[in-house]
Image (cartoon, rainbow, N blue to C red):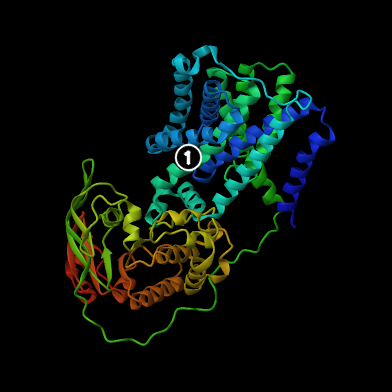
Amino acid sequence: MNVRTGLPLLVLGALVAFPVIDPAATYEQTVLLMAFLLAIQAVSWNIISGFAGYISLGHSVFLGIGAYTAGILAARWHVNPLVLAPLAGVVAVVVALLVGSVVLRAKGPAFVIITIALLLVFQVLTVNTPALTNGSDGITLELPSWSSDIQNIPFYYAFLGLLVVTVGFAGWIRRTKFGTGLVAIREDEGKAAAIGIPTTLYKNLAYAASAFFVGVAGAVYAYFLTFLNPLGAFNILASVMVVLAALVGGKGTLWGPVVGAFIVSFAGEAATNFGGESQTRLVMFGVALVLVVVFMPDGLVPLLNRLVARKRQAVDYIDHVVTVERRPVEPSVPKTEVLLEFRDVGKAFGGLRAVNGVNLAVLDGSITALIGPNGSGKTTLFNLVTGIAGGHSGEIRLAGRPLTGLPPWTRAHLGLGRTFQVTRLFKAMTVMENVVAPLRGFAPGVLASDAVAGHEADRARELLSFVGLGRFTTERAGALSYGQQKLVELAQVLMLEPRMVLLDEPAGGISPGLVDRMAEIIRELNHRGVTFLVVEHNIPMVLDLCDSVFVVAGGSVLAAGPPEIIRSNPAVLDAYLGGVVS
């Protein structure tokens, strides 16, 4: 048993034993159970804000929803609120799904502001619906039915048990394809969609998953307090403490929110004992939040991990063994079937016409180049094909199917892969996690499947060996050289088993030796049936590698034809090739 598993088990054992060893320590038990409650919220918050990167400053709204659900029903049905705890969690999930379908369309500061407003909206609703919530007078619940001799010990174990389940749930999510998809969204939402991850669905499910255990805890908390009022149930300070706990410990990690919750809870208790009023505590926690963000943005747990981790020697290049299969040159077979087609495609950004009536066809099984000066509309055409550039005029078809209106992940599921001019790997993830992240299709069972296991893991290792990076599976993607990242991104796209790949400057920014390696890989993949549309400024590579070339200028196609025709076209030479083609 290593430290990562042994230490949490040791701490858990001590927490379980504490009320048995000293049952009269009621104050200490209360302080601890409030730390458990904060940790439950912080771990849950971490699912949507730490894993997926959508920062919520009003997440304690689900604690209030769970508390009021249990309080209202317990008062009307005369049942124990603990019995209603699972139902309170379900109600929180339903609210999260309804709200998330709207608010998760916003990003960044807009989402943060909306979550704060959501907390205040529910506070106002509970005040102004006295028939249901008893308004500002609040709801009084019956006292616990057990003996006063054991006081808060049942609540202590209820919150501790709920914390253990919540941490287990969050850890399970992180190990699944769902969790990998959430981290991909946090790192680069546009790229996640481009590799087949249905980002809208993932975000909504994450928001719902982050609400359930908070709602359950709210029901237990209502019974613990035996009194609910709007200001207490929907308290902005409670939400600030949740965020602060996760940031102090380390958002995006499993144990960071737990560690941070204990630190923040104990600090808050100390501030209260020294006479701090609620407004003073709010200012104190607000200042602490700013200081943590500025001076310790990764949190305590990642900082400790970096301090104790052994330094690994950096590897500067790819595997020495070239694994690309060498094949004899086969007779060229004429390619006649159109795989990707642009029909009078246009795109404007305000008054700028980036693409102007483009008509071109990429033949199935070909390697086709798209060349032209910077700003000529090449990357915009790629963005239109993959669905990340918004609406456009004209029509784009893949294998005869119109792509208009399809989200990026659906286009990826149809067999369309794409690399980017500047590599867009998920740099906080390992190389293996990056390569297994793409989804060739979506079904509910995908969410719960292991992120790195089975056939997909074997396929990822095979692809990494194919591009020469088989030794780098456990390395963090952001630690690789730029050329290595280019190869990992290509392996990542190949996990989609694409019929067509759009390569945006595959030779850009890499060494000449690696350019030759990249060309070999493209040829081999083309032999295996993959069609390529390549944007590239390395003209010798284009003319040597491609079957046909389209020259774009000012958003329009200037010339088209096989490399030997483009090579000798005077207009193209003068305008784009500088008069020299080697």
Which residue occupies the foreground of this view, 380 or 239? 239
* Number of numbered callouts drawn: 1
Which quarter of the rendering shows the C terminus?
bottom left
Residue type pointed to by label 1: Ala
Q: Using the rendered view, name the quadrant where residue 442 is placed.
A: bottom left
Which residue occupies the foreground of this view, 540 or 387? 387
Q: Using the rendered view, name the quadrant where residue 83 is placed.
A: top right
State the residue position of label 1: 208
Who's the residue at 84% across and 32% down the image? 22
Residue 95 in view of the camera: yes
- Give residue 227's position: percent from left, percent from top: 60, 18
Who's the residue at 62% across and 32% down the image? 291
Q: Would you place residue 128 above or below residue 35 in this image?
A: above
- Give residue 375's position: percent from left, percent from top: 28, 53
Which quarter of the rendering shows the N terminus?
bottom right
Left or right, residue 260 beside residue 123: right
Left or right, residue 457 beside residue 303: left
